[in-house]
Image (spheres, rainbow, N blue to C red):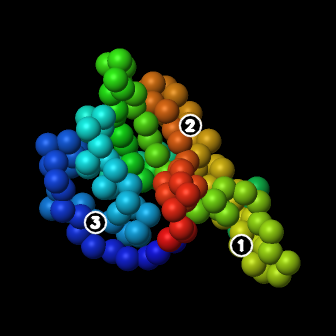
């Protein structure tokens, strides 16, 4: 994921939920998603890091101890299809490798990869539950969906 941070200038500020003067992307992937949301005529409204969702995370030193934290998905997007149907989505943008268990041969790296995957799964389960109660679809978007056949960024 290309790390860069900058203020995003909206072409359609009327669609954005929030203060457009504070819309900062934290990666080139988020920048790409902002462009899609901002310029797609089927996107009626959208927000960035819109709502915190509580989830329980195990402590590294003692997995039986859990702490309540807040997870904020990247995007909230409301779309309308050609037939007029409205769909609400909560979207998390993540590298594909963080959506699967670790594969490193190095034990320390593998531990970190596995822990990241477990925490991500806990966040996503909490988000799916929260969204289901509000008739919102929760979706994890990786580079494959964000960029398709274009080169990785």
Q: Secondary structure at mark 3?
A: strand
Classify 10 Å Cα crowding around label 1: few (below 14), some (14-19), many (20 and above): few
The percent position of residue 58, horizontal first and vertical second, equals 68, 58
Residue 59 numbered tag: none
Q: Is residue 134 above or below residue 94?
A: above
Q: Is residue 139 above or below residue 60?
A: above
On the rendered structure, is 86 left or right of 114?
Answer: left
Quadrant of residue 10 within the rendered picture = bottom left
* Depth order, front residue of 44/70: 44
Classify 10 Å Cα crowding around label 3: few (below 14), some (14-19), many (20 and above): some
The answer to whether the residue labelled 1 contacts the one labelled 3, judged by CB atoms less than 8 Å apart, is no
The percent position of residue 108, horizontal first and vertical second, equals 78, 80
Between marks 1 and 3, how big is the CA–CA gap? 28 Å
User: In this orientation, does residue 119 appear?
Assistant: no
Label 3 sits on residue: 24
The percent position of residue 49, horizontal first and vertical second, equals 36, 53
Q: Secondary structure at mark 2?
A: helix
Quadrant of residue 113 within the rendered picture = bottom right
Marked residue nearer the N-terminal end (2 or 1): 1
Q: Residue at x 15, y 49 (%)?
A: 13
Marked residue nearer the N-terminal end (1 or 3): 3
Marked residue nearer the N-terminal end (3 or 2): 3
On the rendered structure, is 31 left or right of 11?
Answer: right
Between marks 2 and 1, how big is the CA–CA gap? 24 Å
On the rendered structure, is 89 left or right of 115?
Answer: left
Label 1 sits on residue: 112
Q: Is residue 57 above or below residue 83?
A: below
Q: Residue at x 66, y 50 (%)?
A: 121
Residue 128 numbered tag: 2
Comparing marks 3 and 2, which lies closer to the viewer? 3
């Amino acid at each position: 994921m290309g790390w860069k941070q900058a203020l995003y200038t909206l072409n359609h500020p009327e669609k954005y939920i929030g203060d457009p003067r504070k819309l900062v992307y934290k990666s080139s992937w988020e920048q790409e998603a902002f462009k899609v949301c901002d310029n797609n005529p089927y996107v009626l409204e959208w927000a960035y890091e819109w709502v915190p969702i509580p989830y329980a995370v195990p402590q590294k030193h003692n997995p039986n101890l859990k702490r309540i934290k807040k997870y904020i998905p990247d995007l909230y997007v409301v779309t309308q299809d050609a037939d007029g149907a409205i769909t609400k989505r909560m979207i998390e943008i993540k590298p594909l490798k963080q959506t699967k268990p670790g594969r490193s041969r190095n034990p320390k790296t593998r531990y970190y990869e596995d822990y990241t995957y477990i925490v991500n799964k806990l966040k996503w389960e909490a988000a799916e539950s929260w969204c289901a109660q509000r008739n919102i679809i929760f979706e994890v978007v990786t580079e494959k969906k964000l960029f398709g056949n274009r080169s990785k960024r």
